[in-house]
Amino acid sequence: MIKSIIFDMDGTLFSTEPIYFECYQAAAKPMGLDFTFELFESCIGVSAADSAPLMKSYFGRDVDVQALHDGCCRNFEEYMQNNPIPFRPCAKETVKYFYDRGFRLGVGTSNIRRWAETLLEKNGIAQYFTTVVTADDVAHPKPDPEVFLRCAQNLGTDISQCIVFEDSVAGATAAISAGARAIVIPDLKEPTTFVKENAFKIYKSMCDIYPDIDELLA
């Protein structure tokens, strides 16, 4: 029986991934670098620290990854101040659906706490979550299961009694490895064979879960 619901944030609750891609592209251009979608796709769902080797492998060992990351962060900060951050389809409604039915809700994200709290507050859903576990709170980011195990602990629920909504391969792998009921809503990157074989369900949109809701919560 499911008792708690955990949501990833970027790409699951919010359609931030295309914005991050544009921010990285803008940061890379003055450095004479072409930040391709192929590179960005490989970094989706992983921490800044874990994406650094991917960028060095792509651009060469001498690339200043920290400068690239800092530039992206500045661009995203500016974007957040001046633009709304869109929800993914039915994400806000789904959060409220589970909250109104008495489930304890958490967020487990690879993002930093400051941005997570800003995005949740800015979009008017922070009050629905009992706990928010970020990259600042764990020693091992996704695809390690620590973020979801800690989230379940904070919710007072065994991880086997949690649904985790995820979009990325790294996040879905973390949820599956943790022992949660992983529901995958892919955003920019298609699931791997491992995710396809081990996720509880895969949907095109969070809007599509409701016909199966009894099965999801059983």
Image (spheres, grey):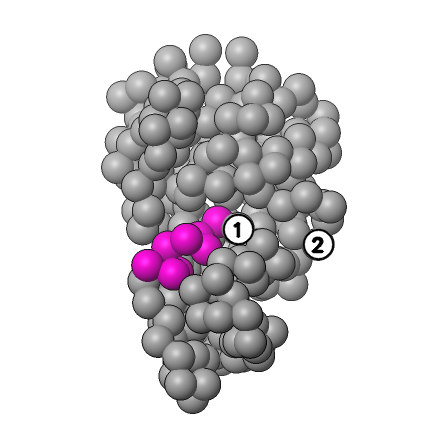
Residue 10 shows up from this direction: yes
- Say which quarter of the image contains residue 213: top left
Q: Dominant secondary structure of the magenta stretch?
A: helix
Q: Does the image show residue 207?
A: no
Q: Nearer the N terminus, badge 2 or badge 1?
A: 1
Q: Which residues are magenta?
A: 38-45
Q: Secondary structure at mark 2?
A: helix
Q: Position of residue 138 (x, y in %)?
A: 72, 45
Checking the image for residue 124, the label placed there is none
Image height of 137 relative to 71, above or below:
above
Q: Position of residue 202 (x, y in %)?
A: 32, 29
- Mark 2 or 1: in front is 1
Q: Give the farthest residue toward the front.
A: 61
Residue receiving disc 1: 46
Q: Quadrant of residue 160?
A: top right
Name the kind of residue labelled 1 in the image: Val
Distance from disc 2 to disc 1, alpha carbons, whole Å, reads 13 Å
Which residue corresponds to mark 2?
A: 136
Residue nearer the viewer, 70 or 55: 55
